[in-house]
Image (cartoon, rainbow, N blue to C red):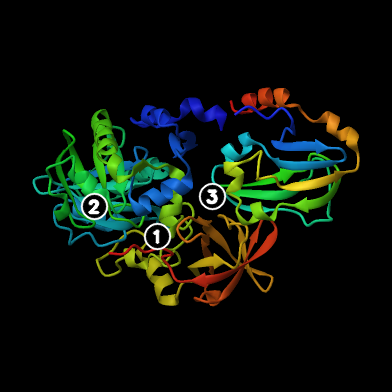
Amino acid sequence: MADQVGTLKQTALLDRHKALGARIVPFAGWEMPVQYEGILSEHHAVRTASGLFDLGHMGQVEIVGPDALPFLQFTTTNDVGMLEPGDAKYGLLPNEAGGVVDDIIVYRNPPGHDGYMVCVNASNTDKDVAWWQELRSRRADLDVTVQDVSTDLGMIAIQGPRAESIVKRVTDVPVENIDYFSWRIGMIAGVEARIARTGYTGEDGFEFYAPNSQIGQIWDALMEAGEQEGIAPIGLGARDTLRLEARMPLYGQELGDDISPYEAGLGWAVSLTKGDFIGREPMEKVKSDGPKRRTVGFTTVGRTAAPRSHNPVEVDGDEIGTVTSGTFSPTLQANIGLALIDRSFAGVGKPLQVIVRGKPVQAVQVKTPFYKRDR
Amino acid sequence: MSAPENLKFTKTHEWVRVEDDVVTVGIADYAQQELGDITYLELPEVGSSISAGEPFGVVESVKAASDIYSPLDGEVLERNDDVVDAPEAINASPYGDAWLIKVRVTDSTQIESLMDSGEYDTFAASAAH
């Protein structure tokens, strides 16, 4: 990877991460912090207090114009027709075969601002924008503009039970009135930002979008305001263990070009009733036939090596699927994982064997999410 | 931290403490730092044979798994079950409580090929870049 370092992109906060002693790794074409203090302590900080994440690598795409809504309805899976200004919805960017190009959050801009902003995965940003541009040229009947605004826009998240109380110290915006999957524009730490109540950890919290030139002001203010409440900077390592405990999918693992949303357990993010969209027919067929594969959660039995992505999954010596994500769960103090398996073997309580570095590890299917916060 | 002067080291970041023909083997501080929070450890049974340069165990952190290589040929005399039960001890005390196995060495001339602490410090510093 060393040969790539020269070409890696940097977020506006990289110097802050280095000053905090982070270990920096290449990720999706970016230099990103994978850990500061350590994955376990960062994970626990988010579950018990709060954590701050640099998400400057994530992509943002603006979709505006008189036909922005019909264009989004045609090019994404969920029904965003009912979104009021300031509302957001999780969805998928599909391909024509009924697979998934990316998973996304569609934000309808707050009152007074037309159009939508879509937050996409870092590793997929260029691919997503190219796909949207192609679909736009196919739909010359629609008056819409697709613009990648990632370069100018920074993004950070604060997550955890103390998140709201910390945010309230650095803004006059009544953030307690921002509902889950809503956002508004307001001043925070002297910066005009888009403040969204979304996240990727299973905890309450906020995500902030602001220009790269100013995002550091928000980061610094939150670090300072949160000191007494146990705020910690969180790297990509804990981001992954947090999202997996909450059974949130990761593109490239639970989701991909050749995995149907119905196989990934994301049928709830597909609206077959909203009208036509890319990939609708093959998705409907998978739903009506019943998906051949299902994504299941499992834990290992006893103290074992941790299953990892791509490990084979067997029943009675026959390979029936693969692990999509696996880790030691800091909250459960046990190994957890998700696997995409032949549906006839899926069922809570049913056994699996996961082949970890050539050796079988006993596992049992369990209900997901593995972790759910008290509300 | 500088490597303790009474230990010998491998290029795969194991340490060895020599007491006549019995050696104690552990994981060097550099390796535990690279791994991060250690969550799981697999060690061989007492009585098994291990060979220089071959894996004898596995150590896992939250993010990664890594083989542990034998510095020498020999027979496992003792294994540290406390550290198997609480592998995070490797992070806390890599050169102390968190030793892994004791081995009766079959070819003591192999000890000569291991690095001393000064050589190892230089080696680990270059590996870090």
Q: Residue at x 59, y 74 (%)?
A: A351
Q: On the image, numbered disc 1 is attached to which residue?
A: A246
Crowding at dot 1, Cα within 10 Å, few <14 / some 14-19 / many 20+, comes out as some
Q: Eyeballing the image, is A239 above or below A306?
A: above
Measure how far apart labels 2 and 3 are at the Cα level: 28 Å
Say whether mark 3 and mark 1 are on the same chain. Answer: no
**Badge 2 or badge 1: first in the primary sequence:** 2
Nearer to me, A121 or B35: B35
Q: Is residue A88 left or right of residue A250?
A: left
Residue A197: assigned label: 2
Residue B75: assigned label: none
Percent from the top left, x then y, of residue B60?
61, 49
Q: On the image, numbered disc 3 is attached to which residue?
A: B62
Check whether the beta carbons of the residues at disc 2 and disc 1 lie within 8 A of each other: no
Crowding at dot 2, Cα within 10 Å, few <14 / some 14-19 / many 20+, comes out as many
Query: Which of pointers 2 and 3 indicates the residue nearer the eye?
Result: 3
Subunit ID for the residue under disc 3: B
Q: Eyeballing the image, is A182 above or below A39?
A: below
Q: Is residue A239 visible?
A: no
Residue B45: quadrant of the picture? bottom right
Amino acid type for the residue under numbered disc 2: Arg
Amino acid type for the residue under numbered disc 1: Ala
Query: Which of pointers 1 and 3 indicates the residue nearer the eye?
Result: 3
Q: Is residue A340 visible?
A: yes
For mark 2, give the secondary structure.
loop
Percent from the top left, x then y, of residue A245?
43, 59
Amino acid type for the residue under numbered disc 3: Val
Measure how far apart labels 2 and 1 are at the Cα level: 16 Å
